[in-house]
Amino acid sequence: MRFLEPSLAQEIVNRTMNIINRNINVMNEKGVIIGSGDQTRIDSIHEGAVRVIETQSGFEICELEAEQLHGVKTGINLPINFQDKVVGVIGITGNPEEIRKYGELVKMTAEMILHKAVLIDEMRWDERLKEELTAQLLHGTENLHPYYFERVKRLGIDLAIPRVAIILTVENPSEAYKWIRDKLGKDDLYVMHSDYIVLLTKVDLKESEWNVSNTLQQVEKWVIELDKYRQIQCKMAIGTYHLGVEGISKSYREAIYTLHVAEKLDPFKGIYFYEEYKLPVFLLRANQSGIGEEIGPYFQKLKQQDKNRELLETLKVYIEENGEVNKVAEKLFIHRNTLRYRLERITDLTNKDPRKTKDLFDLYLSILQNKIK
């Protein structure tokens, strides 16, 4: 594995030169200069570094040796060690007598920078792996290889922790991603998709029941903070809690379906909860399975004959006001007789009487189905 890349080598050069104000070279495991205060020396072989790698020890170059060796100047060259191996060489240009006192300081600084860079890279790798494992979890555990659970355990992911899925959509996902990631707890999981961010947040249970209000309050706080302090408008769709690991994929599907229908039904809301959209989600899934048309084309029949949309608007308000005639007439600014005429007209066109509960439900389903298509 190569630990010293040119970008990191140059970072070591820049930082150590600021400490001692001398030219610094960093060579890779083959003795090639990959970082230097003198850019003309990049990619050249440093014979002093080659000797350091061969002997696994430091090497000082005086003027006489500088004339005999290729690609070197007077100075000190010391091995860069990582995990008990020499992975590169750091050189300080100058009279060895004058710069010898800086040698161990520069070597230690280089190794510290290397250790930190490798640690950060490992953490990033673990985060990427964690996202990958979480993404697989969203689609259920049925087809997961047993090795999957070993990897999950190695990364410290406790699948026994109760979680619900939250879908976050926003115009600038990368910015929101950085913000929301810092807000999550250590047991929360997340996945970045091209169109949305998936959060699997830990939830509180009370006697095996999900404390919904706590989750909703947290989500509302996130939405407000993103809008107020980051000027980021977002929408969040929340699934429900299901027991066990397999419940995570169920919660995720609920959140996805909820987002799909709620954006059409309530485009100006910021938070969508599955429990409030169970019926339209059911209709969406019915449409996807090919049985949605069995509901009946009542909406289309009304639309074809209702040029001014009076009947559809009347039916909409009638449903909103739970069939209370006085309230419906008042809201539509019409006489009760006019309302009665319109309801009878709806009955004639659809063969469904809005004044009968079952017929009204059929009409409502037809309208709802049209909205979510």
Image: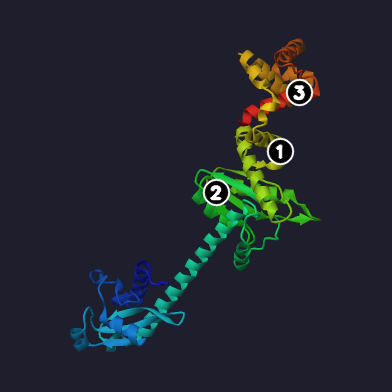
- How far apart marks 2 and 1 lie (CA) works out to 33 Å
Disc number for residue 326: none
Q: Residues within 10 Å of mark 1 (few under 14, many from 20)?
A: some
Kind of residue indicated by mark 3: Leu
Q: Are marks 3 and 2 in contact (CB under 8 Å)?
A: no
Q: Residues within 10 Å of mark 2 (few under 14, many from 20)?
A: few
Which residue is tagged 1? 278
User: Residue, x 55% and y 46% (percent of image)?
Assistant: 196
As drawn, 206 above or below 194:
below
Which residue is tagged 3? 360
**Residue toward you, 162 or 282:** 282
Helix, strand or loop at disc 1?
helix
User: Residue, x 69% and y 42% (percent of image)?
Assistant: 274
**Residue toward you, 160 or 227:** 160
**Residue toward you, 193 or 317:** 193
As drawn, 351 above or below 35:
above
Residue 352: where, in percent of width, then height? 75, 18
Residue 227 shows in the view: no
Residue 68: where, in percent of width, then height? 19, 85
Task: Please tell me which of labels 2 and 1 falls first in the chain.
Answer: 2
Residue 138: where, in percent of width, then height? 62, 52
Kind of residue indicated by mark 1: Lys
Which residue is tagged 2? 229
Q: Quadrant of residue 72?
A: bottom left
**Residue toward you, 215 or 101:** 215
Task: Please tell me which of labels 3 and 1 falls first in the chain.
Answer: 1
Q: Residues within 10 Å of mark 3 (few under 14, many from 20)?
A: some
Q: Are marks 3 and 1 in contact (CB under 8 Å)?
A: no
Residue 72 shows in the view: yes
Q: From the viewer's perspective, is 223 left or right of 50?
A: right
User: Residue, x 64% and y 61% (percent of image)?
Assistant: 187
